[in-house]
Image: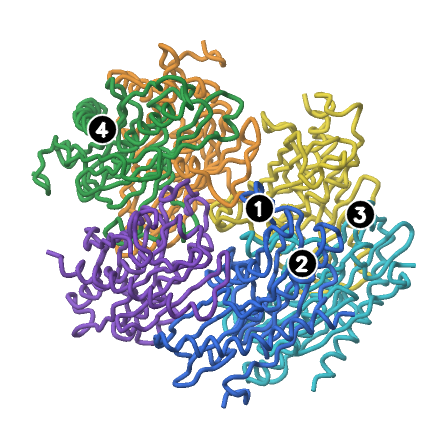
Chain colours: A orange, B yellow, C cyan, D green, E blue, F purple
Amino acid sequence: MRADQRASHSMRPVRIQCGVSPYAEGSADVSFGNTRVLVTASVEREVPDWLKARQEGWITAEYGMLPRSTHTRNRREASAGKQSGRTLEIQRFIGRALRAAIDLRSIGPVTIRLDCDVLCADGGTRTAAASGAWVALAQALEYLERERLVSGRVPIKQVAAVSVGRIGSEYLLDLAYEEDSRADFDLNLVFSEDGEIVEIQGTAERKNFRRDELAPLIDLAYSGVEVIFSAQRNALNQRA
Amino acid sequence: MRADQRASHSMRPVRIQCGVSPYAEGSADVSFGNTRVLVTASVEREVPDWLKARQEGWITAEYGMLPRSTHTRNRREASAGKQSGRTLEIQRFIGRALRAAIDLRSIGPVTIRLDCDVLCADGGTRTAAASGAWVALAQALEYLERERLVSGRVPIKQVAAVSVGRIGSEYLLDLAYEEDSRADFDLNLVFSEDGEIVEIQGTAERKNFRRDELAPLIDLAYSGVEVIFSAQRNALNQRA
Amino acid sequence: MRADQRASHSMRPVRIQCGVSPYAEGSADVSFGNTRVLVTASVEREVPDWLKARQEGWITAEYGMLPRSTHTRNRREASAGKQSGRTLEIQRFIGRALRAAIDLRSIGPVTIRLDCDVLCADGGTRTAAASGAWVALAQALEYLERERLVSGRVPIKQVAAVSVGRIGSEYLLDLAYEEDSRADFDLNLVFSEDGEIVEIQGTAERKNFRRDELAPLIDLAYSGVEVIFSAQRNALNQRA
Amino acid sequence: MRADQRASHSMRPVRIQCGVSPYAEGSADVSFGNTRVLVTASVEREVPDWLKARQEGWITAEYGMLPRSTHTRNRREASAGKQSGRTLEIQRFIGRALRAAIDLRSIGPVTIRLDCDVLCADGGTRTAAASGAWVALAQALEYLERERLVSGRVPIKQVAAVSVGRIGSEYLLDLAYEEDSRADFDLNLVFSEDGEIVEIQGTAERKNFRRDELAPLIDLAYSGVEVIFSAQRNALNQRA
Amino acid sequence: MRADQRASHSMRPVRIQCGVSPYAEGSADVSFGNTRVLVTASVEREVPDWLKARQEGWITAEYGMLPRSTHTRNRREASAGKQSGRTLEIQRFIGRALRAAIDLRSIGPVTIRLDCDVLCADGGTRTAAASGAWVALAQALEYLERERLVSGRVPIKQVAAVSVGRIGSEYLLDLAYEEDSRADFDLNLVFSEDGEIVEIQGTAERKNFRRDELAPLIDLAYSGVEVIFSAQRNALNQRA
Amino acid sequence: MRADQRASHSMRPVRIQCGVSPYAEGSADVSFGNTRVLVTASVEREVPDWLKARQEGWITAEYGMLPRSTHTRNRREASAGKQSGRTLEIQRFIGRALRAAIDLRSIGPVTIRLDCDVLCADGGTRTAAASGAWVALAQALEYLERERLVSGRVPIKQVAAVSVGRIGSEYLLDLAYEEDSRADFDLNLVFSEDGEIVEIQGTAERKNFRRDELAPLIDLAYSGVEVIFSAQRNALNQRA
């Protein structure tokens, strides 16, 4: 039994709500249990210099934690004057995940910037952020369509992310902070809606893992992602 | 008539909710109309070096805006590598306001750090932040009492902040963003519960103001602050 | 009696001398007692990006203290790699004050940059800086006229700044450093030549102030500003 | 056939030479084909603050590319004033890989810092760096033993890293730069000597990958790592 | 004939005035013609970490130019967030020059920090700064003696700096800005009172120089330094 | 006798090898004894903004030390977020030296950037770097000719750098680290092939030097530079 009475193969409650920012072209308030992330999508009508020659758009992410999203306060990165390696690693993870959702040629020369700000951090902030970012991205594409910045509909594949790990002999889905800090190893996985893998990041924290452990872990992760896929669709459908 | 149908002497709806952060020693989710700020209070059991010789505590504030809290996205300060002059000016304003709420000798050698993060910016973010920060501070003092980091109760005076301004011949209370950008001048005022002034900041944006205008403007501001004082008390009383 | 034998309603000796920089388009060496600030005005034939669409000019200020302008040496901000919150707050104060002196549409697309460098800091550096900056600005406008960067004369209103405060039951004009550090509260005020207020910044340092104290304090401040106005005019008139 | 005539399941020539730095406690000059990285291990007799309470050591890595290690020159990070997200991501990858090689309690309160500087970048710089860093680490442990900073021998497990990817229907081992930029996806894997996985990082660059592709890819990667394990042992054995 | 009617072997007027800062332990306002530098000496009762083991003091310099000390305004380094290479090169030059004036063991564990801020830059700022810094240093040593931070008198050798250069076939002493920018090459030299060389920095700007040119150039420089030595002594003697 | 058995007037073994970087337009691996520097020349088809009006090219240098090129590890400057004063001073020295090798008008509007990265530092890194940079520059000019970015051949003068110093009564050529740290003073000299001086930097570290010592020191330096000139030519001639 886990601290929150979950079964080992259960997700924490996944809640995603759209439209929480009155100004952004897309937004989502996503929580996996206590972990809560606010995501906005901002459309900018230009692309980075290195992309200008091609007729493509760009999707990128930024990630931040409010200083007291954590048990003990972290120094504000704006005040420290730089973003930590962890922050940069996570925002690169989110950006790659979301770029796999569309063909960048389909949006023309715009940048969609996904800001993921963690209000409460109880493990899995990167998976919650990437999963919520997909919902914000979907709204931003609707904005492009509505504003006729693209012709027709932009095809989008659903993507979502989840973590799995091992404590002792048990495989656990969607690790909370306390579990994550005790895990032998953990994996973060991004799947697309057709069940394929977009990204896998696995790290042996305390113990290495055997090659034959990957397949059951990935299946467990995929079962969790299907719950998130459903929450993402509901969030988009339940808009007024 | 104002854009939101308010009378010139009316506050926007003021909502303050406590306890929104599961980890912080105090927290408040405060909104003045669409403007919404999340405030946490963090207790640190040490003081800045220059205070170490004295037996006093310290209260300080940090302020930030989520990149898309505004109509068009602002660059993330953590990524830019520095905080803007406006950010630093506002967090100094909030810190001074809250230090006026208590006698710093009454809390012993602890620092209370008030993080004010703007989720949505529609004018008056500094006044909403300072007003919400008082609620978070009050909870942090209760924490000090509960943890016996102080002996007995820490006396606290209520403080709150509000803006007033002039458009044409009309004095307006609690300016929204669109009003603020059209105002001849505006004042931000911090009051303590006994009606005294803690801080006044007034700037002629388009027109200067006459000396005899200050008194009616300050009275108007004080009428608004009484609404906020009431919301602050309710927020603390309505905790489970 | 004050440390320098001044009456409570007296300014320190105000000295302003023009033309101390051989290269700048305007310059002033201003002192209020021991406090001494060197101001230069630099004309740049471009405006910030966000102003380019409009046919307006811009006035902005930068402020710095020489490391040993103070009793104990402060770290050089260029070496620290960033400007303090105090520095940014003061340079924003000076910039706002001077922008109130003219109609920015009257100077066309130029930026006038006012550099205020404190050679000696004995309280009131921001008020001395703003007051001296007006003299440098007036010369820079003459430069624009002389170089035919504007057609005709640019209308300018005189602006100057002064501080007032309370120690015990006494209101004091133009606080020196030692007074400032003992004051219950202090106000910095910028006036225009017609007696209107451009900026007011008041902070309760040790005690809050009553609303009915503002009027006499502002009158006291205005009496001081008239002394500065006179010194500003003399400085411009006494040029060879 | 690959550009360098390799079979799809072949490593590029792996060369590792010890002792190339006269001052460091361990060093390796490692190349995978044209990719060449210089690694040094530096022993510092202290640990980060957050580790001080525990009786443990620490292993960490820093990574950098010489500005012209690449086809077109990259800006020097020291001059830019910050390290890129890619740099930080890679040095975190190397640090995690090497911390899996030993039990940190076995080295006492010392930090071993692995500097990985890329002289020539032709793909696989992170896998070459991590593999060479193991050789430098092994020498640093011998230094600890020789200097009697530890009692007895420090147990160490061999770790090494390699990349695999897919281009079209073909799985390729140890991607060179040109292959990497054309790959549908690629994986970087760190193995320990017992065949277990320390770290897996897989990213769909152009196409997602199916779950059943992981097993053959990992087997291919492991075949490459055995070549590197052998080069690592030879490098240590061939010292004078 | 030079622009200011000087002979090729003449210094510009050298003026040095002591005691211009009311707070610093030593100060000098030094000008070589239009070039004017304010120098302060600050005594700090500690030394850099790497010196703590030895019973020695330290002398170091910082250099800065006011933004409008030059013909066209330079960006404020505090605002740019870093000091230029030129600034760092010059402050290292000044520090080395002054450390040659005393035996660092004679002042005990104190740091003397020489701040050199250029008010007006017309060539030779580094030589004026170093020459004025000696006067400020001499006063700081008297302060150490007066405060009994040292026992007895601290022996000090006089040091001063000057530039020489060649334009066409003519050797010029103490180059002004316009001369410096046209010179084939120039040398900055620091001498001690016994005629020995403390520092020589020579750079071919437009043309290289022959080895046999050094001797006459150095003799010319030394003739100028004797003028500065005299001004330094006068400045110290003429104090009230 | 010196630590490495050299005569006082002998250079350490000078080795220069071309073409060590497969991507750069020029490269050299240069060593003076244990000191070893990798230099690359990168051709960029643009010039700094301030040069755009003129039809000239630009040559500039950057310098860095690998963190463990020294006896004890130095902090990585990219991680520290800024380059030290020493680094900036040295890269300015190298840039000036190389700009003296050609007429900048002869290469048209291109920038040649010389990256000098120190793999091992045993004294004389700046002289080895500048000497090796000349070899890289010569190759870059051949590249310009080959790519027809210039018409005809670019005239180049050979330049090289060496250090000399005094320990006690003895003059030493090409100081190693241990000698440098004991020297009374040292000089770094850059010569051009016609025996003229491009740059001289001399610093009294422990003792000042007499004016009449310069001539024999410079002759000693020149004898060393002739050895380097020969190694430079050999390096270019021995290319395949």
Is residue D38 shown above or below F104? above
What residue does disc 4 label? Answer: D232
Secondary structure under tag 3 reads strand
Looking at the picture, do discs 4 and 3 lie on one chain?
Answer: no
Between the residue at mark 4 and the residue at mark 3, the CA separation in whole angstroms equals 73 Å
Find residue A126 and report its horizontal and vertical position in percent.
41, 31
Residue ID at (74%, 23%): B145
The answer to whether marks 4 and 2 mark residues whose Cβ atoms lie closer than 8 Å is no
Q: Is residue A1 left or right of residue F57?
A: right
User: Tag 1: Cα neighbours inside 10 Å, few (<14), some, or many (≥20)?
Assistant: few
Residue identified by numbered label 1? E48
Mark 2 Cα shell of 10 Å, populated few (<14), some (14-19), many (≥20)? many
Which chain letter matches label 4? D
Badge 3 and badge 1 in a common chain: no
Which of the pair F169/F46 is nearer the observer? F169
Q: Whole-Å distance between the Cαs marked 3 and 2?
A: 35 Å
The residue at which mark 2 appears reads as C68
Residue F139 spot, x, y in % from top left: 20, 62
What is the three-letter code of the residue carrying label 1?
Pro
Mark pair 3, 1: CA separation: 46 Å
Vertical placement of E123 versus C81: above or below? below
Of residue E192 and residue C194, the one placed in the foreground of this image is E192
Whether the residues at callouts 4 and 1 have beta carbons within 8 Å, the answer is no
Callouts 3 and 2 close, C-beta under 8 Å = no
- Give residue E157's position: percent from left, percent from top: 61, 64
